[in-house]
């Protein structure tokens, strides 16, 4: 019976990677939109609008207040509407994307706020439009911080997939709970944890690597 | 020609309202280098920042080349800004872009074709003597080089006016001198009107044709630079010139002693 270990692990790892990749992608899109809106609608910024700013902030805090396991349940009808099922990794992507987006929104907000006001003023002074300022000044200037923040978020999403796994999403978390915990298969429990550790480490290394290479190119003295 | 009429701006602070600009009138002729001098907090920075609307005046008008800058908004304001270059005390270069990309930025914003941009960037980098630094990032440059990139960026769109917001205040004296020489050259070569604000009298003395002294948000003295040095009327001008004279006298004394020995 022990020879099923690698098969189970491989299957679960693939499901996890699938969920993490797509959830990160959609959460990043949503998060970028939220974060950018938060920054540019802030007081004194290029598209200042206090009501919109307050509304987005409220929305983000609202979604972030809901425990993730409850959020999944709340979003089950939406998952069924979008992907046609409320079970499995694909259905989980809906909840994961929406659950992680507000967190990413805050991370994007933080990174973009690090861009000095002087740089934005210089762009305004040459006649740049708000859109140009967002895509050619804010995002490129904040890129090293953005990459570091997004790395944190992807790791967060990986952790969330384990939670989703507890209620039918599949993946490594689900494997650890169903086999390791509920069937007392300690070998699977340890192997799963080991794979998760390696996965998280490699995400962190990749993120650090990218961020560092951007940073070195810009700031390292020749 | 730049014409400022009755320009006022009040800031609301926790301690009440502060009048940063109080009914300012100013006339700057085309092609001259005009210096605005004042102590910190006198309102000079607010004044120059109103000229490209980085700061919104409460009332008054600013005419640049026959266009009332204070009446513009949206696309037309952005279009007008393309013809008003600005350089900053802390350079405000984009760290994520190379020298080339920084200078190209205003041209990209203006929507020029790639070939035209390349040609113009090369031309302008040649003018500020940074052709060998095209691929460098700002962090790899010295303060003086950074300001040269700032000047190149400000000139890229071939502006009618260059605004200089304390552009040499963060530089050492030697670099300050070279940047001032560059501004002087540009003024002559391109017939560009330059408005600069400073708290350094040497800067005025070195490159300005005319000047205005600003004190508590009011213009208290204006005219040719020579007049300020020969016959300062306002408190600020007297104080500035007085300090300079003091040092000059002291230096004369020390040199005199040296001869005696």
Image: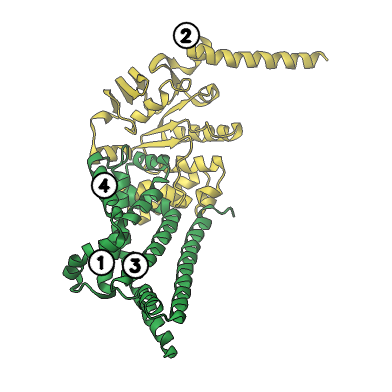
Chain colours: A green, B yellow
> Do the residues at discs 1 and 3 belong to one chain?
yes
Q: Position of residue A203 (x, y in %)?
A: 45, 67
Q: Which comes sooner in the sequence, label 1 or label 3?
A: 1
Label 4 is found on which chain of the structure? A
Q: Position of residue A173 (x, y in %)?
A: 37, 72
The label on residue B167 is: none
Disc 4: CA contacts within 10 A as few (<14), some (14-19) or many (>=20): few
| Callout 4 secondary element | helix
Disc 2: CA contacts within 10 A as few (<14), some (14-19) or many (>=20): some
| Callout 2 secondary element | loop
The label on residue B233 is: 2
The N terminus of chain B sits in image quarter:
top left
Gap between marks 2 and 3 measured at Cα: 77 Å
Q: Position of residue B45 (x, y in %)?
A: 41, 27
Disc 3: CA contacts within 10 A as few (<14), some (14-19) or many (>=20): many
| Picture layout, residue B255 above or below residue A84 | above
Label 2 is found on which chain of the structure? B
**Which numbered disc, 3 or 4, marks the residue closer to the eye?**
3
Query: Can you identify the residue that label 3 sits on?
Result: A163
Residue A136 vs residue B177: left or right?
left
Query: Can you identify the residue that label 1 sits on?
Result: A94
| Picture layout, residue A210 above or below residue A38 | below
């Amino acid at each position: 019976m022990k020879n099923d270990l690698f098969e189970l692990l491989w299957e679960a790892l693939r499901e996890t990677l699938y969920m993490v990749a797509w959830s990160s992608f959609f959460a990043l899109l949503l998060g970028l939109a939220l974060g950018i809106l938060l920054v540019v609608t802030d007081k004194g910024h290029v598209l200042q609008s206090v009501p919109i700013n307050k509304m987005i902030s409220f929305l983000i805090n609202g979604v972030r207040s809901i425990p993730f396991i409850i959020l999944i349940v709340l979003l089950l009808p939406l998952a069924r509407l979008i992907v046609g099922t409320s079970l499995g990794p694909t259905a989980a992507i809906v909840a994961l994307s929406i659950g992680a987006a507000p967190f990413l929104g805050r991370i994007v907000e933080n990174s973009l706020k690090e861009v000095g006001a002087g740089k934005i003023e210089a762009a305004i002074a040459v006649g740049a439009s708000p859109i140009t300022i967002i895509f050619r000044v804010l995002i490129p200037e904040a890129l090293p911080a953005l990459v570091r923040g997004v790395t944190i978020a992807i790791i967060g999403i990986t952790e969330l997939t384990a939670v989703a796994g507890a209620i039918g999403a599949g993946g490594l978390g689900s494997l650890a709970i169903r086999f390791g915990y509920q069937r007392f298969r300690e070998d699977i429990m340890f192997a799963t944890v080991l794979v998760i550790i390696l996965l998280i480490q490699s995400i962190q290394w990749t993120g650090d690597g990218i961020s560092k290479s951007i940073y070195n190119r810009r700031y390292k003295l020749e | 020609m730049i014409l400022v009429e009755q320009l006022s701006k009040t800031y609301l602070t926790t301690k009440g309202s502060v009048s940063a600009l109080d009914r300012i009138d100013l006339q700057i002729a085309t092609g001259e280098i005009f210096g605005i001098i004042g102590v910190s907090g006198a309102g000079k920075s607010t004044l120059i920042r109103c000229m490209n609307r980085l700061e919104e005046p409460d009332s008054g008008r600013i005419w640049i080349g026959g266009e009332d800058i204070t009446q513009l908004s949206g696309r037309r304001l952005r279009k007008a800004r393309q013809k008003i270059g600005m350089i900053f005390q802390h350079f405000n270069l984009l760290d994520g872009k190379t020298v080339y990309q920084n200078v190209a930025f205003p041209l990209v914003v203006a929507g020029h074709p790639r070939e035209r941009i390349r040609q113009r960037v090369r031309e302008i980098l040649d003018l500020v003597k940074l052709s060998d630094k095209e691929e460098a990032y700002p962090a790899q440059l010295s303060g003086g080089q950074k300001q040269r990139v700032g000047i190149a960026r400000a000139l890229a769109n071939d502006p009618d006016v260059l605004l200089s917001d304390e552009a040499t205040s963060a530089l050492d004296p030697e670099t300050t001198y070279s940047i001032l020489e560059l501004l002087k050259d540009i003024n002559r070569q391109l017939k560009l009107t330059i408005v600069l604000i400073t708290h350094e009298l040497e800067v005025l003395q070195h490159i300005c044709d005319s000047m205005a002294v600003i004190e508590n948000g009011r213009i208290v003295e204006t005219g040719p630079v020579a007049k300020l040095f020969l016959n300062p009327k306002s408190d600020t001008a007297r104080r500035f010139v007085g300090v300079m004279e003091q040092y000059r006298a002291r230096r004369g004394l020390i040199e005199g002693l040296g001869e005696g020995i």
